[in-house]
Structures are given as structure tokens and as C-alpha cells.
Image (spheres, rainbow, N blue to C red):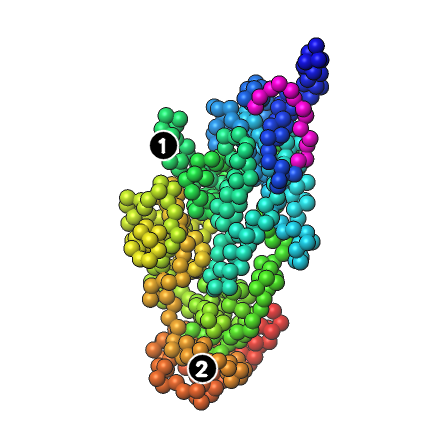
Amino acid sequence: MNEMKVAMASLSLLNIISPQSVNLRYSLSLFPRNNISFRVPSPIIIGRSLSTVSTSIADHQPSLSNNGFLKPYLSGSMPERRLKVVVLLSGGVDSSVALRLLHAAGHSCTAFYLKIWFQEDYENFWSACPWEEDLKYATAVCEQVDVPLEIVHLSEEYWNNVVSYIIEEYRSGRTPNPDVLCNTRIKFGAFLDAITNIEFDYIASGHYARVIHPCSDQSERPSILELSKDKVKDQTYFLSHLSQAQLRRLLFPLGCISKDEVRKIAEKMDLPNKDRKDSQGICFLGKIKFSEFVARHIGEMEGVLLEAETGDFLGKHRGFWFYTIGQRQGLRLPGGPWYVVEKDVKNNVVFVSRNYFSFDKRRRRFRVGSLKWFCGSCPNQPNELQCKVRHGPGVYDCSLTLDPGTDGPGLSAFVHLSEDDQGLAAGQFAAFYQGTTCLGSGVILESWDDQGFPVCAKALEIARMEDKSRLGKPVKIKFKPESPPKISDCKDNNELDRESLNSQVNVTDTRRQAPHGLFNSINVNWLQKLKEKWSRIF
């Protein structure tokens, strides 16, 4: 009799609350509670297993009658199946539209917000972090369609696996990629570990990429990562270092949609964040400048800027870790543009040049390590590949030669691009493609071949000076000459002596000539003073 009363009470509860919301929230009771915050209490449902709940979900999915315009955009959401999908929701437009597409396709969705901001007791400046705003938007998006939202705290994992690695890489003179690391180690790494007790079919996010999964009767075949429809927004570069085990669990509803279409869908659905701008920069920094973060956690150490071709002392910098190869912003040198071309990590010296694009075949050969291939091995035609060395639509034809060196068989390789690249930086990733298929990626190593940007002997000798105060004041920078100075014009190491260094670096390079033509009729000294005055103002 008591069992009958309990059953009647359960049925009464189900009549008050919609079956969809009850069933979805019941599944939350299975989640491990050590690092997950529950925003919606789970109703008590007696005598029903998770499999029964899943069946009920499929029976009560929303139809497309109210959202019929979405049908052409559902090809990346597997509408032909009824799935249990875990959705990573950031509060941005992309992940919000991905959630709504999955919901419209009839899937059982549970949204998760990953809190990767540092703990409140850390001494930093996180008052500028917008995670409260992100969570507010994520909550509003979920409430529109009655999808539960949970918070997973991964601050400690993010610090240990991403931020600490970034800091050490910068200290070593390399330029890591936080977004690649966040995907491999946090979003589809630590988060997967946190939900191991949950039954689900796929993890979905708002990435612009496509994953082609094998048919059920060909489950032994690998899943394939493909370029998205929007080649400008395509994010396969950031996903290129995932493992096959991670890729098999992923679903990207936006892979067949352009960014413009996503914005239109958000507008038509009247999403709360439809007008929100896309996030920029590193995910854990929010509105904080990366240079401020580096200065806080690594510090500053004054060093010198030397011209690579002449060894001229041009100015000072705050530390080599603030600069990356190919960088032109932040140097604050007149007569440019100037580019960072090499770094001496041991002596904290940054070499710069105005002739970064004047040396042929200097930046098309490099070495990669920590190679990962989605298929498990190097592609069959390594001489007919394409390569991305940064996020964006730019791609190079390339050839790949495996390096049988100390890293182990197949873990490193030499890459030869079809043309020069302006900013190959050690620590960044090189992603490899065959047509529209992303094959995998590796980390660009600092041990490139001997065809790096040439730094003259005088500059190298000055870099090794222990007491750089002897350099005196920086030289006065003249207009850029029509032709770059030859490296052979610099004196050899054997000709240098300590006594002559000061006199050599404190005088303006007399080899440089003022530009011909129009400027010959102008008082060059007056024009130079005017240019220097403007450079100080701006």
C-alpha cells in the first residue's frame, strides 16, 4: 500500500513538471559532485532507470514546427539520430547557437560552463575578468529552452596544465599557443575526466570544424577532422593536436555554417547574447593585457635591442619573453617598420631588422616535434601536404621529412614550405592537411636549420658582453636605406676588440645613405629632426 502511495506521488510530480525537464535534471544526480556546482536541484524520481529516462527524452523532443528555418543548418548536428549530448557553453554566440541547433535536432542536451578563472585567494587582478557576465548569458540561453546548466570548476587543472606551461615556455624564449593547449588539456581533457561517470554520446562545442565519424559497422576506422565551411573562422588549427580518442567523442554543429549565418540564426532566435561581440585574446585573461600578465608572473629584466645586420645599439626592452619572431608591434623604434628576427635567450638580447622580407628562403624550413597524427602514423604522401603555422585561412604547400633523431621514431620531422613565412615562432604549432582533411600537428622547435635570419658577428659579440652599460646611448636611427646592408660589411669576430666596441656602437652608421629622388631637394637634417620629433610624440 505504501509503495502505491509513493508511485502516485511520483506520477503527480511528473504531471506538474514537464517530462523533458524532469528527465534531464534527473540525470544530473549521477554526476560526481567534487568539482561540479548544481544550479538546478534534481527532482526525486522513484523506480526509473537512466535508460528509461533516455527513452522518455527521445519521446518528448521539441519539433521543428516553431523553428523550421533551422532545418537547412542541422546537417552538423546528426538530426537522424537521438543522442545524449554534453554541450560546452561559454556564454558566447557560437556555443549558444550550437546548443540551440542540437536542441532543435531532437537531442537530449545538458550544458556545462567551465570555470577556469583562478581561485579568489590568488593574488592577481581578476577583478577585470568577465566570467560572471559569461555565466549570466549562458544561463539565459539555457532558460529559453529549459536545458539544465552546470558549472565545472577546473581552475586548478587550468593553472597546472596550461598557464604554468605557458609561463615556462616564455621563460625559455618560446611562444606557446594557449588555445591549442586549452582544447587538448582542458575542454576535451580534464573536462572529460570530470564527467567519466556520466552516460553520453558526444561532447559538443561552438568550434568551427567538422568531424566525420565512421559508420557503426566500421567502428574500427578513425574519425576524421575536416575544415569548416567558413574558411576564415575555421578552427581546425586549434583542434589539430587532439588524440583520436578525444576526436571520436566530439560533435561540432557549426562546421557546416558560416559565421554570418550563425549571427543571423542568433538574431532570428532572439538569443540573449545575439549582439555580443566575439571574445578576443587568451581565454583566461579576459580584459587583461597579456603583457601585464607576463610582467606579473615572469617579471621584467632590462635588455638591449640590436640591429641584426650592423650590431647597432638601438634601444632597450623589458625582457626577451615579451617578444616573438616576426613581431613588429611594441618595439617603439623610429624609421621602421622594425621586426624581431632573433632572440638571444641566455643574454637577454633581442635582434631586430627592417629587412625582414629581404632574405630569400630564410623562413621556409623548420623542424617540428611532438607530432600527433589522427590516424596514428605519418601520412603516406608526406611530400604533398599543406601546412598552417597559425590560425587563419593562410595555408602553404609543404613537404615533410621524418627525423630519426633523439625524439623517437616519427615524433619529429623537417618541414619545407613552398614559400617564406613572416613569423615562424618556436613553441607555436604547425598543423598539417591533405586537401580539406586535418591530419595532425606538431610543435615548432627552436632548432631550425642554419638558414635562419642572419645576425652579423659584431651583433653576436655585443650580445655576449657582460657589461652592456659600456654601450652608452643608442645610435640615432636614420631613414631606411634603399638596399639592406650586407652582412659581410660587419666586421668578423677576429677584428673586434673590447676597446673599439664603444666607439663603433656610439656613432651613426655612415654607410647608410638618404633616399634618392624627391628627398635630395630637401634639407635632410631638418627632415630627420622633424621625423624624430613626431616619433617622440606618437
Front residue of this view, candidates 322 and 378? 378
Real-space CA distance between mark 2 and mark 1, rounded to the nearest whole angstrom: 66 Å
The residue that disc 1 covers is: 220
Q: Residue at x 47, y 64 (%)?
A: 173
The residue that disc 2 covers is: 509
Tell whether 34 sits left or right of 391: right
Residue 527 position within the rendered picture, expressed as x and y whole percent measured from the top left: 54, 78
Find numbered disc 1 in the image and state the secondary structure of the residue it sits on: loop
Quadrant of the rendered image containing residue 66: top right
Residue 16 position within the rendered picture, expressed as x and y whole percent measured from the top left: 71, 19
The part of the chain drawn in magenta is 38-50
- Residue 353 belongs to the span the image colors magenta: no
Residue 239 position within the rendered picture, expressed as x and y whole percent measured from the top left: 46, 44
Q: Is residue 1 above or below residue 280?
A: above
Q: Is residue 157 above or below residue 355?
A: above
Residue type marked 1: Glu
Q: Main secondary structure of the magenta part?
A: loop
